[in-house]
Image (cartoon, helix red, strand yellow):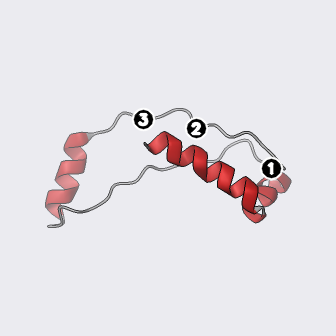
Amino acid sequence: GSGQYRVFGSQDVDKQWISEVRKGNGFTNTRIVPRFIIEGLNYQPFQQLASGEKELKRFVAEIVKTCR
């Protein structure tokens, strides 16, 4: 329960690559989304995160804040 979550280690955005991907598939509305790796959780905390609505909302809110 009630863990603290933080997102760190952001990468540089390769705008040229994004442009090439969008041109290459013929769709200009293609969305590129970030990849997240969850580290430092053993089974029990991960299970609590995945099964607890409050914890999951807190975790997702941190990701959304990072993406803005």
Q: Amino acid at mark 2?
A: Val
Dot 3, how many residues are within 10 Å of its Cα: few (below 14), some (14-19), or many (20+)? few
Dot 1, how many residues are within 10 Å of its Cα: few (below 14), some (14-19), or many (20+)? few
Q: Which residue shows up at 24% across the image and 41% down it?
A: 15
2 and 3 marks in contact (CB < 8 Å): no
- For marks 2 and 1, the one nearer the N-term is 2
Q: Position of residue 54 (x, y in %)?
A: 74, 56
> Which label was assigned to residue 42?
1
Q: Which residue shows up at 28% across the image and 39% down it?
A: 14
The residue to which callout 2 is attached is 7
Relative horizontal placement of residue 53, taking residue 68 as reference (left or right): right
- For marks 3 and 1, the one nearer the N-term is 3
Q: Position of residue 20 (x, y in %)?
A: 17, 52
Tell me the element at label 1. Answer: loop
Closer to us: mark 2 or mark 1? 2
Dot 2, how many residues are within 10 Å of its Cα: few (below 14), some (14-19), or many (20+)? some
Relative horizontal placement of residue 35, taking residue 17 as reference (left or right): right
Tell me the element at label 2. Answer: loop
Q: Position of residue 66 (x, y in %)?
A: 50, 40
Alpha-carbon span between mark 3 and mark 1: 25 Å
Alpha-carbon span between mark 2 and mark 3: 12 Å
The residue to which callout 3 is attached is 11
Q: Which residue shows up at 59% across the image and 44% down it?
A: 62
Relative horizontal placement of residue 53, taking residue 33 as reference (left or right): right
Q: Amino acid at mark 1?
A: Asn
